[in-house]
Image (cartoon, rainbow, N blue to C red):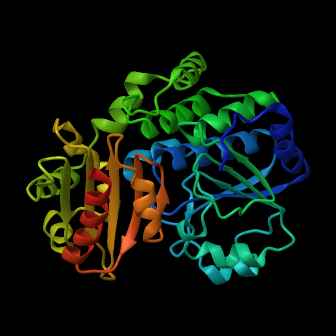
Amino acid sequence: MESFMIDNANFQKAVEPINKSNNILVTTHTRPDGDACGSVAAMCDALAGLGKKVKALLLSEVPEWYEFLFSEKPAILGQDVTSQQLDDGQFGNFDLIMIVDTNSLSQLPKFEDYLKRQTGTPVLVIDHHATSDGLGDIELVDTEAAATGMIIFELLKSADWEVTEKMAEVLFVAVATDTGWFRFGNTDSRVYRTAGELVESGADCAKIYHKLYENFSPQRFKLMSAMLNTLELHFGGRYATQQLLRKDFERTGAAYKDTENLVDECRRIGSIEAAALFVELKDGRVRCSLRSMGKVDVRTIAQKFGGGGHPAAAGTYLSGPVTNAMELIKTEIGKQLK
């Protein structure tokens, strides 16, 4: 996909259906990360500020450390709202559907069927991933943006909509988390300019850092400890693997959402060029999170198995057992490291 900065004319194409709509549904990918949560929260607050009726619907639970982003606790599909209730209009009759931080049906489980049936409802996609199923009637896609939250901030400024202190905070979280608190290779001057503007609008860096990175539950800390004990190095220390089995969650009392960003812990080892975390799920599948320091394109590996993401950070689901999943990914990593 060709990457480009979105211009005011394209932002205006997104503003028009928002202005025409009264009831708006905002959603994002399953297992929402900081960019997804921050983008949904910012969009909901912005739309509410315009006098719109807006509802957030998430496809899996929000990690505790992101709960502070939401003015109202978002509904979870399958917990607070059934697929049938969504279909029947009991959750709402929407005249605009917004999907942020993804453009892939595979990342919208349970919601994808509903989406396919909404043939008369316009869909607005705001995303920064190259992996795309073209889900939007209108799409604001900028693959050069380090985070979807950056595109949303630029939309707000282009439309001259108010950016409140709360919105600045949630958008700062979106940008900071998708750049690894400004450590990853996607941290360019545009990222720092955006962060600076968000601080000027009221984002408090120190408070945000504490909420995100100094706020582990004892259960999550024990889970991380269990993961670190499984570390294995391959290809002369260039590739690191770690794993978490169902018994690890039972023993520590941690939840599956507690695994977010744990794959990044082994990046501290100087020789590593790629890393993977394999998590055994309740249904027997294995979720694989992939990271690269630059030489390996993990997105192409994830896409081979039906997943997606970025060249430096991607993920996919594989058939169990974990040993089988690990061997599949090791083979693909080995091809690239050669």
Q: Position of residue 176 (x, y in %)?
A: 45, 33
Q: Position of residue 136 (x, y in %)?
A: 75, 59
Q: Residue at x 65, y 50 (%)?
A: 1
Q: Residue at x 82, y 45 (%)?
A: 14
Q: Nearer the viewer, residue 142 or 263?
A: 142
Residue 2, above or below 24: above
Q: Nearer the viewer, residue 55 or 154?
A: 154
Q: Residue at x 62, y 72 (%)?
A: 111
Q: Nearer the viewer, residue 30 or 188?
A: 188
In the shown orientation, is residue 304 left or right of residue 90?
left
Q: Is residue 23 visible?
A: yes
Residue 18, above or below 182: below
Q: Is residue 260 visible?
A: no
Q: Position of residue 161 (x, y in %)?
A: 78, 31
Dividing the picture into quarters, in which one does residue 290 lie?
Answer: bottom left
Q: Position of residue 193 (x, y in %)?
A: 57, 19
